[in-house]
Amino acid sequence: MVVVSFRIRKCHFVQLLATCLVLSTVMVCWEELDNKVVSHVKSYSFRYLINSFTYINKSLTIPHKQARSFSNFHYLLDHPEKCANQDVLLLLFVKSSPKNIERRNAIRSTWGNESYIQNTLGVTVRVLFALGAPTTKENEPSWSRKSGFGFQEQLVEEDRLHRDLIQKDFVDSFYNLTLKLILQFHWVHSRCAHARFFMTADDDIFVHMPNLLKYLQNESARGVTDFWVGRVHRGAPPVRSKYSKYYVSFETYPWLSYPDYTAGAAYVVSRDVAAKIYQATLALNASIHIDDVFMGICASAMGLSPQEHPYFAGEGKAPYHPCIYDQMITSHSHVDDIYDLWRAATDPQPLTTRTTVQQKWREMSELFKSKVLSQISA
């Protein structure tokens, strides 16, 4: 009897010890879990207060002269005549790095081909590339010394051929993306305010131009205003880790969440929204370097809200499927396959059956896979 009682007490002790170990593990991990999950729940609830903007209005509004310091850079390359005396449906700015000449050329040959759009789709679209100034350090990569040209001289030569670079003299870097955003809206205001829509996109985006223009023509016919569409981020909390390039300090932005905003990869606004964003940049502190977040702050200040559009992929890459690509408008992370996608988007042959559609995209998917495998094996 004594032996049985001892065994029972020993069993209870082992269970208690195991429970303590489990609880200790949970307590150790809880802080990280709390930061990532609970803080997001708090930020998502907090967004309803932030989106009214009155909560952050006083701290982010700065004197007009100080706000001007974020836009008072000189043009190195400019084309004020680009939109003059034309009925422009869409002005599209592509955010590009000086070194990405191959991406720019690919866009010029595919979805950014203004002549094709005018002659085949029957509308006027203007496509420009927004850049800052290349750095001049000795340890710059080899692209900046091709053919013996200096950094800026290469861009001047490229612009002489294509006349589509808009450049100011701030350093082109990730941490100056907000300056590049301001460049775009100020150029729209002073050079192309009559364009019915304005779009900004990354240089690794694929834009299904026929689908986009059909959509915008329908919206224009309806006379839309306060129009701002893309892939919407709602209740996104600021990143507080100093190891992240998206880090924003409490001093810069002390609140739990950002106002709702669209992914900077690609979004479209109507001309009245573009005018309001321009006005907001004249009064707000642009020291937040995340350009799409700053866009959300400007929009919130002007009482604007983004609209989710299912065919804007945001930072994501649309899956290769005919039913998706037949409707999609933008998809991210396309460099090597941009020509294949453009051929599929502009193929004049009618796709009369579902089997034809599936076969066409199956062939394109296999071609893309073979290219990837060949690069891996090389």
Image (tube, helix red, strand yellow):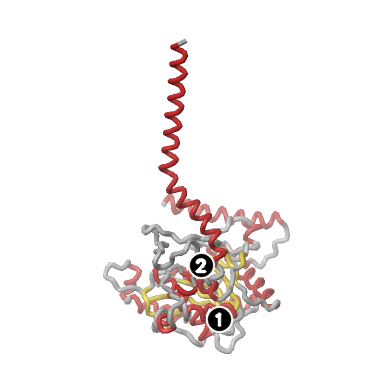
Residue drawn at (51%, 55%) of the image: 40
Instruction: Residue under label 2, please give it.
Output: 264
Q: Which amino acid does label 2 sit on?
A: Gly
N-terminal of the pair, mark 2 or mark 1, is 2
Which label sits on residue 112?
A: none
Above-or-below relation of 52 to 238: below
- Name the quadrant containing residue 197: bottom right
Whether tag 2 and tag 1 are in contact, CB under 8 A, the answer is: no
Image coords of residue 228 (percent x, y)? 59, 72
Asked if residue 106 can be seen in this view, the reply is no
Image coords of residue 352 (percent x, y)? 73, 61
In the drawing, does residue 78 fall left or right of residue 134? right
Query: Which SS class for mark 2?
Result: strand
Residue drawn at (58%, 55%) of the image: 319
The residue furthest left is 138
Q: State how far apart marks 2 and 1 are (Cα).
A: 18 Å
The residue furthest top is 1
Instruction: Residue under label 1, please give it.
Output: 275
Q: Which residue is nearer to you in this view: 44 or 211?
A: 44
Q: Which residue is nearer to you in this view: 95 or 12?
A: 12
The residue furthest bottom is 85
How many other residues sit within 10 Å of disc 1, few (<14), some (14-19) or many (≥20)?
some
Image coords of residue 211 (percent x, y)? 64, 68
